[in-house]
Image (tube, rainbow, N blue to C red):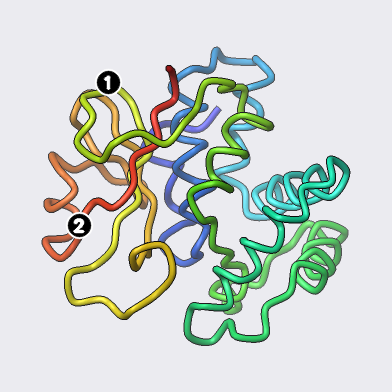
Amino acid sequence: MPRMDQIGVLNRGWGICGFNSSLYALHTHSGRGSGRGKMADASARPSRMLAEIKTFMVMLEAYGRHDILQSIQDFTRAFPGFEGFTIKAYIGRIDDIVDRDWVDPGDAASYSVGLPPKAVVTYLRMVCGFPSAQKVAVDAHVQESLVGVSKKSGRTAPYKGLCHWMYELDGTIYSWGERFGSVTDANEDYVVQYRIALTG
């Protein structure tokens, strides 16, 4: 199982923060060798991470959650350079990559996919084993949560300008394989717009 400081490393080059932040939480609640621990391992291996993302999308299709799939597609398209993003094409690229078990590091940005708040909650509940995960007030006092941030100087975008997800545990923020004392320590331009608690 990867160390805590390895989990967010892929997110330095890929826009996969909704998944990475969830895997931070999974790591916190995982025992070595457990099923959850093996899932958290995805965060340190590029092809395994992409397989994890595909698994979630296929599950959404199987459960008829076309609303979530559409929201992921629409949200991803809102980012510059991703206007033509489709779930179908993304899964096709993952299939090719996983078959070869090799990811082109020079093509990192194209592995990005945006998760709006409801999609993050659904991933936490459906895949990560947090059935009580729910969106709460931004200023709610919870021990552990995922926080969605926008930039004060950011563009006008869906979901209050949401641009990044981070994991918070006991007041410490985890993102990109690093630790911060607060959201603004990570980036002074960040403003918390969403908070997802893992327990009710």
Q: Which mark is residue 20?
A: none
Disc 2 to disc 1, how far (Cα)? Answer: 19 Å
Q: Earlier in the sequence, mark 2 or mark 1?
A: 1
Q: Is 192 on the left or on the right of 195, as rendered?
A: left
Quadrant of the image containing the N terminus: top right
Residue 140 x/y as whole percent: 23, 30
Q: Amino acid at mark 1?
A: Gln
Q: Residue at x 35, y 33 (%)?
A: 136
Q: Residue at x 18, y 43 (%)?
A: 180
Residue 10 x/y as whole percent: 49, 56
Q: Answer above or below: position of 34 versus 138.
A: above
Q: Answer above or below: position of 96 versus 78.
A: above
Q: Is 4 on the left or on the right of 52, as rendered?
A: left
Label 2 Cα crowd, 10 Å radius (few <14 / some 14-19 / many 20+): some
Q: Nearer the viewer, residue 188 or 62?
A: 62
Q: Answer above or below: position of 174 versus 87.
A: above
Tell me the quarter of the picture where residue 172 sits: top left
Q: Residue at x 84, y 50 (%)?
A: 61
| Residue behind mark 1 | 143
Q: Nearer the viewer, residue 172 or 123?
A: 123
Q: Amino acid at mark 2?
A: Val
Q: Nearer the viewer, residue 191 or 188?
A: 191
Q: Residue at x 61, y 71 (%)?
A: 74
Tell me the quarter of the picture where residue 174 sits: top left
Residue 179 x/y as whole percent: 24, 41
| Residue behind mark 2 | 191
